[in-house]
Image (cartoon, rainbow, N blue to C red):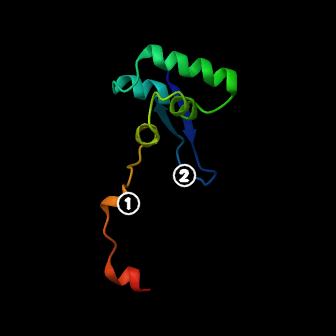
Amino acid sequence: MKRRRRAFGSLRKGFALAIITTLRLGEILVQAGVVSKEKLELALKEQRQTGEHLGAALQRLGICSERTIAHALAEQIGVEIVELADITPALDAMMT
């Protein structure tokens, strides 16, 4: 399985360079059982032909929903998805 390495650093003294190993979007979807390897290969072929992002190709081909892709991307970069429909804003926040 290929892994892409991404490095983040700072120009300020005293900050170390952090190396993060990240799975590719397609690998995350296959490991989660959302996409088969065959469907991923089909989407990757489309991506190469059209130049679009893999997520866009997966969605256009009907292989994945936008929500599924968003959750996989969130996992890839280590953030949580916030479902706004599940949040009730504070009353005072709505009055200002």
Residue extending farthest top: 38
Q: Is residue 17 above or below residue 34?
A: below
Q: Name the residue under label 1.
A: 84
| Left-right relation of 11 to 59 | right
Q: Quadrant of residue 49?
A: top right
Q: In this view, does 43 lie above or below 9?
A: above
Q: In which quarter of the image is residue 17?
A: top right
Question: In the image, what residue occupies the spot 46% across and 28% down?
Answer: 23
| Left-right relation of 87 to 38 | left
Residue 92 spot, x, y in % from top left: 35, 84
The total number of labels drawn is 2
Residue 28 spot, x, y in % from top left: 41, 28
Task: Give 33 or 79, whichever is nearer the viewer.
Answer: 33
Question: In the image, what residue occupies the spot 40% across and 18% down?
Answer: 36
Residue 40 spot, x, y in % from top left: 49, 20
Q: Regarding mark 1 in the picture, which secondary structure is present there?
A: helix
